[in-house]
Image: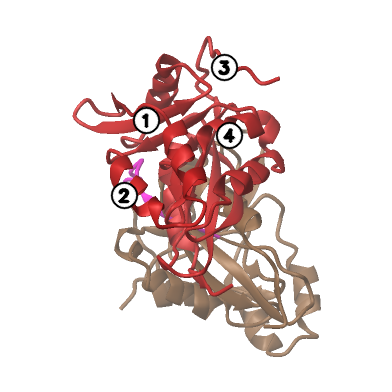
Chain colours: A brown, B red
Amino acid sequence: MCPDVVRIRHVKPEIRILGIDDGVFKPHTQGLADIIGVVYRGGYWLDGVMKTEVEIDGTDATEKIASMITQSIHYNQLRVVMLDGVTFAGLNVVDIKELLQRVHLPVITITKEKPLDEMIKKAIQKLPESKKRLDAITNAGKITAIHTHDDNQVAYMQVAGLSLEDAEKIVKNTSTRSSIPEALRVAHIIASGLTKSKENV
Amino acid sequence: MCPDVVRIRHVKPEIRILGIDDGVFKPHTQGLADIIGVVYRGGYWLDGVMKTEVEIDGTDATEKIASMITQSIHYNQLRVVMLDGVTFAGLNVVDIKELLQRVHLPVITITKEKPLDEMIKKAIQKLPESKKRLDAITNAGKITAIHTHDDNQVAYMQVAGLSLEDAEKIVKNTSTRSSIPEALRVAHIIASGLTKSKENV
């Protein structure tokens, strides 16, 4: 059994966060895109990295990311999963409620720009398995604007398995360098810097 | 003109370091191994990543690493290059004096274990271009034992283009988490975590 909401009484400075972002890919092609996971101790120390691949505009992101996490040597240390939004490799939507159930860890999405749910929903209508994708967008839930590193900068958060208050506390504590948590900032740098698009796999 | 020894009067906490390590590869095979470069601001913030490939047991490491550095968007920001020893992808030896001349940046090698120069020299005798490899081992110069993060831990350093005193200062200041500088610790985690062996390329 997995509780719906995890209670985190005290956010330790060294709380292990997994930040996940996607690599470079050629939009609207058939093929795979790399997904990079970066393990950070709080906002300071990189502890590990992991990788998986998902189909461009596919529907396997939730399953593939869940497997990457549960098969990792870092899995037992992790306390929270953070995603750069819910769409990966184009319109491969992660269902954060399902991810929570699969990995038994709370999931927080953080983006610098407000997620454009209505625009995404419209684009999804034309794709196969559109209901599954739409459900994932709906399951991402309420979008909450928060201040993190700097009171002048806003980031947007969606949460599964954690109270908004606890999620905000974790995001603030781990956003040591920018308006997003280090695990996500660094996942983006590594994913965009080290991956190549893989077409027609 | 590139001076033989760069003088660094004051080691800024945010000095940009490039840490370089090799990825996973199958020893004694023909093929390529990934080389990962990680840009750190001092001992705290990851600023960027870069990648190249070198031949397993080849002789192209100096040239390939130099090109990776000079072609990087981070090149102008970098102040020091750090290597995990001089041998990459097996016995592909980096000539740190030549690397200094090519990139106009001081080079420091740091290893947790004392480099086994005599053993490496013996292994190199059997390989093509053995003189080039032996010269590179010789050019790595004196091995200096230093304490970095912790007085109980020793690391070994070889230096080109910098006084031993300045090199030691930079290594100590940037070894914030372990006995080696963060740029190298993280380069190792990323290189070993994200690369795959590429045989028979």
Which mark lies nearer to you, 2 or 3?
3
Question: Which of pointers 1 and 4 lies earlier in the amino acid sequence?
Answer: 4
**Element on which disc 2 rests:** loop
Q: Which residue is mark 2?
A: A9
Q: Is residue A69 left or right of residue B53?
A: left
- Whole-number angstrom distance, CA of label 2 to CA of label 1: 44 Å
Residue found at the very far bottom of the displayed protein:
A128
* Residue A11 is a magenta residue: yes
* Residue B86 is a magenta residue: no
Q: Which residue is mark 1?
A: B157
**Element on which disc 4 rests:** helix
Residue found at the very far top of the displayed protein:
B9
Relative to A70, is B89 above or below? above
Chain for disc number 3: B
Q: Which residue is mark 4?
A: B98
Q: Which residue is mark 3?
A: B6
Chain for disc number 1: B
Check if mark 2's residue and mark 1's residue have beta carbons within 8 Å. no
Q: Nearer the viewer, residue A49 or B117?
A: B117
**Element on which disc 1 rests:** strand
Residue type, mark 1 in image: Met
Check the picture and name the quadrant holding the N terminus of chain B. Answer: top right
Residue type, mark 2 in image: Arg
Which mark lies nearer to you, 2 or 1?
1
Residue type, mark 3 in image: Val
Check the picture and name the quadrant holding the C terminus of chain B. Answer: bottom right
